[in-house]
Structure formats: C-alpha cells, structure tokens
Image: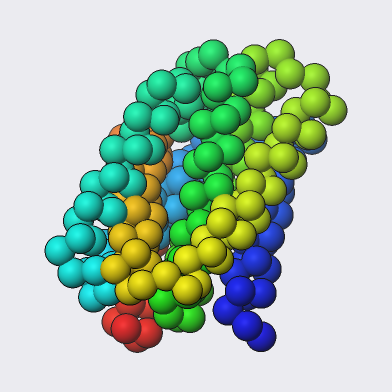
Amino acid sequence: MSSSLTSLLLASLAAVFTIAGGSLPLARKQLSERGISLLVAFSAGVLLSAGINDMFPESFKLAEGSAVIGVSVGFVLLYMIEKVTMVHACREQGCRVHPFGFFALVGIGFHTMLDGFSIAVSGEARASLGLVVAFAVLAHSFPSGVSVAGVMLSCGYRRMKAWRVLMVLALMAVVGAIVGLFFSGASDVVLGVGIGLSAGTFLYISTSDLLPVAHETNWRDYSVPLAFTAGFALMLGAALLLG
C-alpha cells in the first residue's frame, strides 16, 4: 500500500474516532468524570511524547536548525487560533461555555486539519513515524469529539445540527492529510519544518489543553499522572523501537 493511501486511511480513521467520541453526548451517553480525566491524561502523554521523542528528532534530522522554526510556529499558531476563536479544551460536564459561532468552528476545523496534516507529512518522511503520529492523533480524536459535541449541546445546538457539524469537523482531518500529501515532493528542509510545525501543535495541545482538563477535578487522584505517564512511556518505547 502506498504511503499516500495509508495516510488517507489513517486520517479517515481519525475522523471516525472523532465522530465516535462525539456520539456519546449526542446519544445522551455519559462517561464518568474520572473516566474522562484518565482518557484525557493518557492522550496528553501520548501527544507530548510523540512530539518530543518522535517528531522533533525527525524534524531536526531533516531540517537541522530550521526545525525549531517549525516547532515554534506550530505552538504559537495554535495558541493564537485558539485564543482568538475562543476554542478551549472542555469536558462534557462542568464546562465553562465560550462563544461557539462561525469563528470557533473555523478554529476547531483548522485544528482537526492539522491532525491530518501531521499524519501525512510524518508518513512522507518515514512510514514508522507516520504510524506513531497517527496513533497519537487517534488517541486525541476520541476525547476531542466528546468535547466538541458537549460544547455544541451546551450552546443550544439541536442534535441533528450538532451531528452535521461534528461530521464536517471530523472530515477536516482527511482534508489536512490531502494538503500534507502535497509535501511528498518537497525538499528535506521543507518536510522537516512541516513535521516540526506538527510537533509544535502536539506540544501545545498536550500541555495547554489536555493536562489542565485532566487535573481540573482530579488533582488529588494519582491515577491521572499514572495515565499520563503510561501514554508518554508507550510512545517513548515506540520511538526507541522504531527509531
């Protein structure tokens, strides 16, 4: 199977995971607060470890010093988009609801598109890296779907409209993968900067969005840092085995 087809399939799977997560609040099914915290903490560990131990080394190998530009741009870009559009990580229950109009949807869509982009550019650099990044995206997609659907319902969206919006947002991962495939013929430096940009977004999501949410109501629960450590260790092991 070609790397391009693999990337598209993995991005499509990420879209499915997002829709599956969003189906819980939309179908009136609820995860426990503790269950959500553990899932989010595990996802944070996976994303942070993938960014530090897999993506940044690959970016530096391809682009050398220019890799730091990609990482910095990715981190700051996602920060600016999130703060400008008022898109925040949030759990289904006990969430502070923020304005959730057109610009918020654009921000979430761009965020999801970057997930697909990360899968594609990483797979173009090295097939094993693409699989590692895809796993990290999948781990993040499910709780992201729960969050987005929960916020839409909290903002008064009808369930049918929320379903349609969720599907469109999820499919942006496939759009991002298609954009990433245009990097297939790019130079090593351009490809390395692209991977660095993706790594920067992973670092931002894990540290700014996911970890604060994981500890929001479970700051005394030792299982939360254990779940984070398990996710981090899993990806570190993958980096050592596949690197």
Please provide percent x and percent y for residue 156: 71, 13
Q: Decide: is 73 above or below 178.
A: above
Tell me the quarter of the image containing the N terminus.
bottom right
Residue shown at the point (38%, 43%) measured from the top left: 205
Tally of numbered discs: 0
Residue 155 is left or right of residue 87, and the answer is: right
Query: Left or right: 181 with respect to 164?
Result: left
Instruction: Answer whether residue 154 is visible to the viewer in this image.
Output: yes
| Residue with the most extreme right position | 160
* Image x and y of residue 229, in percent: 31, 59
Measuring 20% from the left and 56% from the top, which residue is drawn there?
68
Residue 188, image x and y in percent? Answer: 33, 74
Residue at the image point whose x is 61% and y is 74% from the top = 4
Q: Quadrant of residue 218?
A: top left
Chosen colour scheme: rainbow
Query: Residue placed at 70% from the left, 54% from the top?
Result: 16
Residue lying at the far left of the rendered structure: 65
Report whether 140 appears left or right of 41: right
Q: Is residue 201 above or below residue 135?
A: above
Asked if one can make out residue 53 in the rendered structure from this viewpoint, the answer is no
122 versus 117 height, above or below:
below
Q: Residue 157's image quarter?
A: top right
Where does the C terminus fall, quadrant-wise?
bottom left
